[in-house]
Amino acid sequence: MTTEPASTSTGATHPGSTPGAVLFARVDETAITVDECTDAVGDATAGAVVSFAGVVRNHDEDRGVTWLRYSAHPSAQAVLAEVAADIALAHPGCRIAAAHRVGDLGIGDIALACAVASAHRAEAFAACAALVDEIKSRVPIWKEQGFIDGTTEWVAALG
């Protein structure tokens, strides 16, 4: 599923959000990097930039994984933008960027990248951790993983 990015130069449209607080929040098939997130949030006021990369690993519960496929509900883009705006509201002064990839991914590919910038490290760490937790909890994205033995399994990315 490919959707339009939620990035704008004026930031999130969530009621009460700080203009510019959400630099982008997108769900699509485009390869993502942590650098694009950190570059987007950094500015002269940022004393800390905290980032996260969710990387496709080669195992799951002692079973060898050879590939993953992420699928998203049509609302995933809007929900991700809402999550980012909610985190911006809960952590004033933070600048946020987040991207979740869908489609076929290989071992070592980044499935989720995000970054949070703040004047101070404690707030940036707290906001980034909350962002990742809320994305995993609320954004309707699921993964199908293929195992070395040829079997597959669907795993909800929620929760």
Image (spheres, helix red, strand yellow):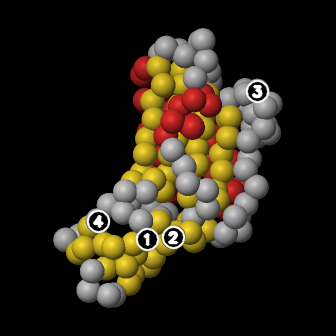
Residue in front for this viewpoint, 95 or 113: 113
- Quadrant where the C terminus is found in the figure: bottom left
At which x and y percent is residue 149?
26, 86
| Dot 2 alpha-carbon crowd within 10 angstroms: few under 14, some 14 to 19, many 20 or more | some
Whichever of callouts 1 and 4 sits on the residue coming sooner in the sequence is 4
Q: Which residue is mark 3?
A: 19
Left or right: 93, with 115 as reference point: right
Residue 104 is marked as 2
Element class at badge 2: strand
Q: Are marks 3 and 4 in contact (CB under 8 Å)?
A: no
Give the image quarter of residue 154: bottom left
Whichever of callouts 3 and 2 sits on the residue coming sooner in the sequence is 3
Element class at badge 4: loop
Give the image quarter of residue 84: top right
Whichever of callouts 3 and 4 sits on the residue coming sooner in the sequence is 3
At which x and y percent is residue 29?
61, 61
Q: Are marks 4 and 2 in contact (CB under 8 Å)?
A: no
Whichever of callouts 4 and 2 sits on the residue coming sooner in the sequence is 4
Question: Marks 3 and 2: which is nearer the front?
Answer: 2
Q: Are marks 3 and 2 in contact (CB under 8 Å)?
A: no
Amino acid on which disc 3 is placed: Pro
Q: Which residue is mark 1?
A: 68
Amino acid on which disc 2 is placed: Asp
Q: Rounded to the nearest whole Å, what is the CA distance between mark 3 and mark 2?
A: 34 Å
Q: Rounded to the nearest whole Å, what is the CA distance between mark 3 and mark 1?
A: 36 Å
At which x and y percent is residue 45?
59, 12
Q: Rounded to the nearest whole Å, what is the CA distance between mark 1 and mark 2?
A: 6 Å
